Image (tube, rainbow, N blue to C red):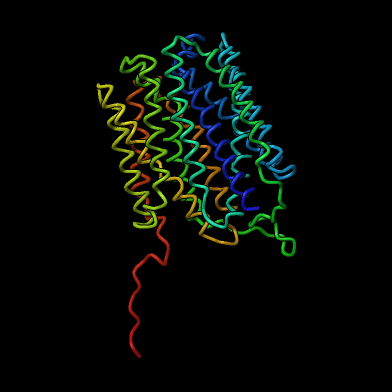
Amino acid sequence: MERALRVARAVTFVYFVLNGTLLGLWVVQIPAVEERVGIGHAALGGFLVLLGAGAFVGMQVGGRLSDRLGARTVVPLAGVLCSATLVLPGLAREPWALGVALLLFGFGNGTLDVSMNAHAVQVEKAYERPVMSAFHATFSVGGVLAALLGAAAIDVGWGPFPTLATAAGLGVVVALVSARGLLPAVPHAPAAGADDGSEGKKRAVPARIWLLAVLALLVMLCEGAANDWSVLHLRTVLGASESTAAFAYGAFAATMTIGRFLADRISARFGPVAVLRYGAALAAAGIILVALSPWIWAALAGWALFGLGLSGCVPQLFSAAGHADPAAAGTNVSRVAGLGYIGMLAGPAVIGWMTHVMALNHTFLLPALFCATAAAAAGILRTPSDRPRVAEPVA
């Protein structure tokens, strides 16, 4: 049993890396696809909404299927679907075709995302200790790998189709080969906050949970903007080559990965309030550097600081939601994560729409404002046990 658990943890890492790599390879190819299809930044923002809409629907379908069939069945099928649909944007020549391609790829990505997270929760329960953060860190490893592979493909003259087709084929193989190591399905307990059969009522949602959810929306909107616009910023604003521009996303993903590996230890020593406050402040400084710098090297440094600062923010918000009410931990985390994902979807579109009225680099001042807001509101993570106690009078 212990060996099976170690294998299950290892293959879960594989699926997280796979998902990060597939998504990252699409990000690296955005400038080439945008140019070939003949659309501008503003129109691209609308197409990215389709990607997000497909992912949102895929998450709903993947979550229900994982509950009914078990993650062991759904994860490899979702991995095959996500891999196979990656090639579609590389085939698109017309705007309508790109829209359909992104909708389908988004659906595959969302299905894989939610099902592999469901399996990660299953592994974490079996380990009886936190291991989730490391899984999310390896998703970022996939982003770094995608930046390196994408830059190498561009250097040898590969276009979007051969790059994405090769990645799709390898992804299908990885998804199928890794399936045997997944854990079998286990029965799920009813979610806290669901209808109470005896009283027919639902738990009231504390205002603090909604505040955490709003902060998650702001922070994840910033992350979504970096995912889809970092490469285009270096390519179109600063005139970097395609291979150099790919490293904008690579710098962001690399420091995001490092930060996720370190965030738990830092939080244990200094507390979650410090991680959110100073992390969000660092992210604000990094994206301001990106927005205002005329130099490629400084912009790369700004994207790196942005990723490092954001890396520990969302885990602190999710953790606070989970600990707010042990009887409704899963429900509260789903509320915070759900609103946060809306922010992730909205980020690229908001930046795209803003390019109608201002330069792309100046739109990044909005994420800077959101990061500053998160830093100022970091005290929401403080619990009553963290506050100084007032000495009681001696009788």
Measured as percent of width and height from the top left, residue 192 is found at: 64, 57
Task: Give residue 189's position: percent from left, percent from top.
Answer: 69, 56
From this view, report whether residue 299 is shown above or below residue 261: above
Q: Which quarter of the figure is the C terminus placed in?
A: bottom left
Question: Vertically, is 271 above or below 314?
Answer: below
In this image, 86 relative to 151: left or right?
right
Between 385 and 366, the residue placed more toward the observer is 385
Q: Position of residue 194 (x, y in %)?
A: 67, 55
Seen as rendered, the residue at the extreme bottom is 395
Where is 151 relative to 70, above or below?
A: above
Q: Is 365 in front, or is 59?
A: 59
Name the residue at 71% across, 47% down. Answer: 185
Total marks in image: 0
- The residue at the point 36 percent across, 33 percent down is 366
Among the 4 quarters of the image, the one containing residue 231? top left
- Residue at (28, 22) in percent of width and height: 296
The percent coordinates of residue 289 (x first, y second) are 27, 31
User: Which residue is at a point 35% across and 29% down the rendered structure image?
Assistant: 364
